[in-house]
């Protein structure tokens, strides 16, 4: 088995369900006025229930895909380890989402799942390189996030000072940050084009770039455009 479409789709669905579940826990809780008996489960009950339903379905898809690959004789030896890792990371993501915050917890989740699925197993000999890649990926993700915040605030204050109403728009600033991040990633891909061709570094670079890019993209969409209250955690700025 290669890290192709059949494996990517259930994995993406799992990540989406975890993000939705984390967002559901971040929503404010409202209850009906006059509910003296406490029958109202609150405004978060339905989103949280839907999140767990999506999570259960995504885990079923992963197990079902693994069973198909095993029947075809194409399942890797580390498939069970990958499934166990996915389950552990799913639980940890929900537990540490508010403590670490959206940026760090999402970047760690994506890097871990992409890296080990790319390797098709979880081995002890991979841990040193994984630790280095995870630290670099988290630092890179924080750097992108910080630069994006700086650009957003700079545009806002410039717009207020000069009377440029467009610059104070969160949608416009998100678009500018997205362009800047895209240009940065294009430059990095050109710079590392020779390194990416080396198998020993390819998995780290792919996992690092994808995790940092997807995390920042989700932050721009949910936080700056749809104004979702994402947990900051230890990333207080």
Image (cartoon, helix red, strand yellow):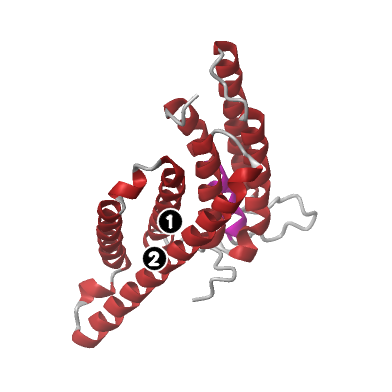
Kindly identify which numbered label has been placed on residue 212.
1
Q: How many marks?
A: 2
Q: Which range is magenta?
A: 16-27
Picture residue at 46% right of the left edge, 66% below the top: 142
Query: Is the magenta region chiefly helix, strand or loop?
Result: helix
Q: Earlier in the sequence, mark 2 or mark 1?
A: 2
- CA distance separating discs 2 and 1: 8 Å
In the image shown, does 227 or 140 lie closer to the viewer?
140
* Helix, strand or loop under label 2: helix
Q: Residue furthest right?
A: 37
| Magenta-drawn stretch contains 29 | no
Left or right of 58? Residue 179 is: left
Q: Position of residue 143 (x, y in %)?
A: 42, 68
Kindly identify which numbered label has been placed on residue 144.
2
Q: Position of residue 180 (x, y in %)?
A: 27, 63
Q: Image quarter for residue 28? A: bottom right
Q: Position of residue 140 (x, y in %)?
A: 43, 63
In the image shown, does 135 or 92 lie closer to the viewer?
135
Q: Image quarter for residue 141? A: bottom left
Q: Residue furthest bottom?
A: 161
Picture residue at 59% right of the left edge, 23% below the top: 66
In the image shown, does 10 or 124 lie closer to the viewer?
124
Q: Are marks 2 and 1 in contact (CB under 8 Å)?
A: yes
On the question of residue 31 being in view, the answer is no
Picture residue at 42% right of the left edge, 40% below the top: 199
Few, some or many residues within 10 Å of mark 2 (<14, 14–19, 20+): many
Few, some or many residues within 10 Å of mark 1 (<14, 14–19, 20+): many
* Helix, strand or loop under label 1: helix
| Magenta-drawn stretch contains 20 | yes
């Amino acid at each position: 088995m290669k890290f192709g479409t059949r494996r990517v789709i259930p994995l993406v669905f799992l990540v989406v369900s975890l993000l939705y579940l984390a967002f559901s826990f971040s929503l404010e809780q409202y209850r009906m006025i006059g509910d003296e008996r406490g029958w109202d489960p609150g405004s978060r009950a339905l989103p949280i229930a839907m999140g767990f339903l999506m999570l259960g379905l995504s885990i079923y898809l992963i197990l079902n895909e693994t069973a198909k690959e095993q029947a075809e004789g194409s399942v890797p030896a580390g498939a069970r380890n990958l499934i166990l890792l996915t389950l552990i990371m799913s639980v940890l993501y929900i537990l540490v989402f508010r403590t670490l915050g959206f940026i760090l917890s999402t970047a760690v989740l994506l890097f871990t799942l992409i890296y080990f699925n790319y390797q098709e197993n979880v081995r002890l000999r991979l841990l040193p390189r994984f630790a280095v890649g995870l630290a670099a990926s988290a630092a890179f993700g924080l750097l992108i996030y910080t630069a994006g915040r700086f650009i957003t605030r700079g545009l806002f204050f410039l717009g207020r000072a000069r009377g440029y109403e467009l610059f104070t728009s969160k949608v416009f600033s998100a678009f500018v940050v997205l362009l800047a991040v895209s240009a940065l990633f294009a430059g990095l891909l050109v710079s590392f084009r020779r390194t990416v061709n080396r198998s020993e570094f390819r998995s780290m670079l792919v996992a690092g770039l994808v995790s940092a890019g997807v995390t920042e993209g989700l932050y721009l969409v949910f936080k700056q455009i749809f104004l979702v209250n994402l947990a900051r955690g230890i990333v207080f700025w």
